[in-house]
Image (tube, rainbow, N blue to C red):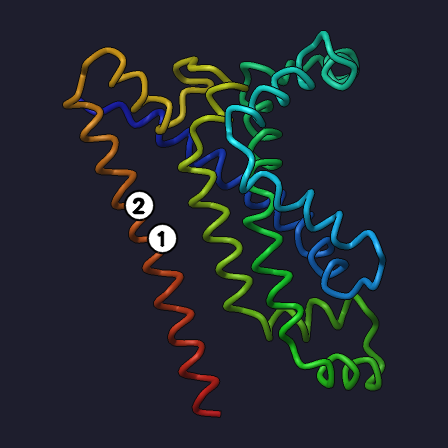
Amino acid sequence: MIDFTPFILSFKLAFIVTLILLIIGIPYAWFLSNTKSKIKPLLETITSLPIVLPPSVLGFYLLVFLSPDSFLGGIIYKLFNIKLVFSFPGLVVASVIYSFPFMVQPLQSGFESINKNIIEASYLSGKGKMKTLFKVILPNIKPALLTAIVITFAHTIGEFGVVLMVGGSIPGKTEVASVAIYDYVENLDYHSAHIYSAILLVISFLVLFIVYFINHKQRKKYDIY
């Protein structure tokens, strides 16, 4: 019988991380798309670092910095009595950092591609910056926004190295689907590993198909106009 607990944990983690990154990513990507600062290349490099950095490296440093013995982990433990290593909150923090570029980069590209005349017209009509962002700009970058949300969600579900390093493999607490597959393989239970892998494969395919299908429809709609 299939234990769906790892999948429930994976979806719970992906939902929370995507929501947090959406809140953080929109203003940050908007800032990156408009800033003329000399430190912009540095900020973009730091933002993109999790894409090229081996998950084991990122996971190791997160494990060190989030540990109760570290400065940051110690403060959080003393103030909130929350241990960020080998716990679900730790998975959330690690996943937010690891999936950050997957939210920011599509949004930044969308912001940079928008017609500046639309923004100026919004300002001239009396709309403020925040109202312009949420009422004018975001509706005009729906494909980029959808891509950012779905890819971030899917990437978080498929994480392995970082979540294993930071969260370990505690059943019902930190054992997400990708880690469960690893555990099954280690125990030579290839049948269960096949089932879990097939489920994740189908989920990944459907997620990407939805993104490409909706984006294709959006492009056709704009081409008509």
* Residue named by callout 2: 203
Quadrant position of the N terminus in the picture: top left
Please name the amino acid that badge 1 sits on: Val
Q: Nearer the viewer, residue 63 or 55?
A: 55
Q: Secondary structure at mark 2?
A: helix
User: What residue sits 36% from the left and 55% below the top?
Assistant: 208
Q: Is residue 189 left or right of residue 130?
A: left
Please name the amino acid that badge 2 sits on: Ile
Vertical side of 20 occupied by 134: above or below? below
Q: Is residue 188 left or right of residue 23?
A: left
Coordinates of residue 2 in the picture (x, y in percent)? 21, 25
Q: Nearer the viewer, residue 119 or 32?
A: 32
Q: Secondary structure at mark 1?
A: helix
Coordinates of residue 146 in the picture (x, y in percent)? 50, 61
Q: Are marks 1 and 2 in contact (CB under 8 Å)?
A: yes
Vertical side of 155 occupied by 28: above or below? below
User: What residue sits 40% from the left and 61% below the top?
Assistant: 211
Vertical side of 188 occupied by 8: above or below? below
Q: Is residue 106 left or right of residue 45?
A: left
Q: Nearer the viewer, residue 56 or 7?
A: 56
Coordinates of residue 176 in the picture (x, y in percent)? 40, 26
Mark 1 to mark 2: distance in Å? 6 Å
**Residue 37: which quarter of the image?**
bottom right
* Residue named by callout 1: 207
User: What residue sits 82% from the left and 80% below the top?
Assistant: 123
Coordinates of residue 133 in the picture (x, y in percent)? 72, 68
